[in-house]
Image (spheres, rainbow, N blue to C red):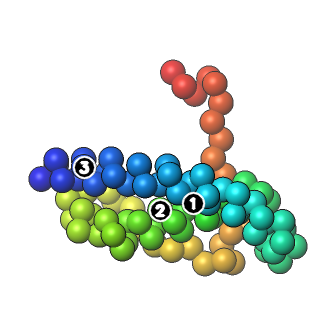
Amino acid sequence: MKIVAGIAGLLLLIVRGFVLWFLIPFSILAWLLVHSWAQKARLGQAICWYDWNFAAFLFLVPFRPALRYSTGEEKIRFLRMSEMREMPTYRISLTQLN
């Protein structure tokens, strides 16, 4: 059953990668209009919050049957809007590509 989990993971990456082309501009616009003053969140936190909730949607709705084959310990859940301000941001540098 590891093949099922592998295929589901690959499909998840493909779908998420495609949708990020639309999700990132949308989250930037939403940050400009709402989140910068309502939640006092930084731009990176808003983008990561939208990405996290979209990934949680993918895991919990269309890819839910594949979750029983995963070995992940962390519980997947949606984050509330109030948690956006505490959201850790992604940082990747050229030295981490080794």
Q: Position of residue 46 (x, y in %)?
A: 71, 63
Q: Nearer the viewer, residue 91 or 57?
A: 57
Distance between mark 3 and mark 2 Cα atoms: 16 Å
Residue drawn 24% across the image and 49% down it:
7
Q: How many marks?
A: 3
Disc 1 target residue: 51
Q: Position of residue 14 (x, y in %)?
A: 41, 49
Query: Within the image, what quadrant is residue 86 found in?
Result: bottom right
Disc 2 target residue: 55
* Residue 75 visible somewhere in the drawing: no
Disc 3 target residue: 7
Residue drawn 18% across the image and 53% down it:
4
Dot 1 falls on a residue whose secondary structure is helix
Q: Earlier in the sequence, mark 3 or mark 1?
A: 3
Q: Position of residue 29 (x, y in %)?
A: 77, 64
Residue drawn 47% across the image and 62% down it:
55
Residue drawn 68% across the image and 69% down it:
84
Q: Nearer the viewer, residue 98 or 31?
A: 31
The mark lying in front, picked from 3 and 2, is 3
Looking at the rendered structure, the kind of residue marked 2 is Ala
Distance between mark 3 and mark 1 Cα atoms: 21 Å
The local crowd at label 3, few if under 14, some if 14 to 19, many if 20 or more residues have their Cα within 10 Å, is few
Q: Nearer the viewer, residue 93 or 4?
A: 4
Looking at the rendered structure, the kind of residue marked 1 is Asp
Q: Earlier in the sequence, mark 3 or mark 2?
A: 3
